[in-house]
Amino acid sequence: MRLALLVSLAALQTFAVETWVAAGYGGRRMISHDGLKWEITEEWGVDGKDDSNNLISAAYGAGKFVVVGGGGWSRDTQAGHILTSPDGVKWTEVKKLPFRVSPLVYAGKRFIAGGPDRTLWFSDDGTNWTQGGQAKAEGIPSWALWFRQGAYGNGVYVFMGEAGAKKEFFWCMRTTDGTKVDFRADLPQLRSLAFGNKLFVAVGNGAIVTSVDGKDWLKQERPVDEKLDWIQWTGKQFLAGGGKVTLTSTDGKTWQPSTIRAPGRIVWTDGQRFIASSWPGKMFFSADGKTWQQSAAMTPNGINAVVKAP
């Protein structure tokens, strides 16, 4: 009995030093050490909108948390932000751009983010940023291209989004280091992207597409009413969901219904623990993907991203 108690205490102590950071609307940044209890460490507004205060994507690398975002439709609210923190508590804005910065992807040695005017920005330390490659999108106005998703695998960074005056084009951009890009704008509408088991997998409304290199994509036939808006790689399998549907696949090609039922969009998982979020600003934690606990209520700022320090 005493030995079991000591083992349990040791496990709790190890878990207690873990750190998650969440970012979202209103410039909200939150920190958690158990995935359930969250503390708001900084916030620009308690009633966040789709404006320059919206923080959209997050990563951890080079010994720091980095969050990015921005946006809005008026000239006064289109600023883009890059902020860093060593601990998730104290934040510094290291770069400001004239429009949204997102998504942010980190892969071992380099951060790369989507930026204004179809252009990538990159950094090796998260603090000093360099303008990178620009997509040559013929027939698409320079202002009408929005980055939405990003992932890294097989030596390439892959970004996806929409473009066109009516957002009628759905595109993919890939790069090895942020300086040069390959671009195509003939994909179906896709809403989330992940990499696992040597494969990129993107999901959308009635669509799942896969790629090894981020350039050539294979589309799977899916029910037209299957509306998938998130996907995660757990380390062993893909989880994808939307509405009341949750699917699982080990290879990204053969999909089965999952027994996991989340009360929102799953924004982080290591395959054993799960963090989900739903509007407005509701957070949930599960130790098995089936039984969920809701975090304490907070002011209504939705959360877009959760990242954990390794």
Image (cartoon, rainbow, N blue to C red):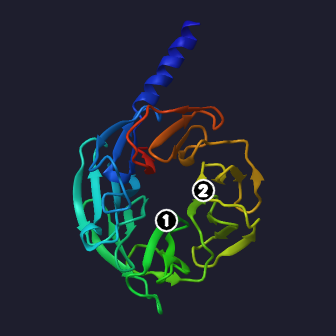
Considering the image in quadrants, where does the N terminus appear?
top right
Name the foreground residue: 14 vs 26.
26
SS at badge 2 = strand
Residue drawn at the location 38% of the way across and 67% of the way down: 113
The crowding category of the residue bearing disc 1, from other C-alpha atoms within 10 Å (few below 14, some 14 to 19, many at least 20), is: many
For mark 2, what is the residue? 231
For mark 1, what is the residue? 150
Considering the image in quadrants, where does the C terminus appear?
top left
SS at badge 1 = strand
Give percent across and percent down for residue 304: 45, 53
Task: Kindly indicate the quadrant of the structure image that contains residue 286.
Answer: top right
Give percent across and percent down for residue 216: 63, 79
Residue drawn at the location 50% of the way across and 14% of the way down: 6
The crowding category of the residue bearing disc 2, from other C-alpha atoms within 10 Å (few below 14, some 14 to 19, many at least 20), is: many
Task: Kindly indicate the quadrant of the structure image that contains residue 77.
Answer: bottom left
Q: Amino acid at mark 1?
A: Gly
Point out the tag, 2 or 1, that comes first from the N-terminus: 1
Q: Is residue 204 visible?
A: yes
Residue 240, which numbered label?
Answer: none
Residue drawn at the location 59% of the way across and 69% of the way down: 190
Q: Is residue 125 visible?
A: no
Residue drawn at the location 43% of the way across and 31% of the way down: 37
The Cα atoms of the two marked residues, 2 and 1, are separated by 12 Å
1 to 198, vertically: above or below: above
Give percent across and percent down for residue 49: 37, 57
Q: Tell which residue pokes out farthest to the bottom in this image.
A: 139
Name the foreground residue: 57 vs 6.
57
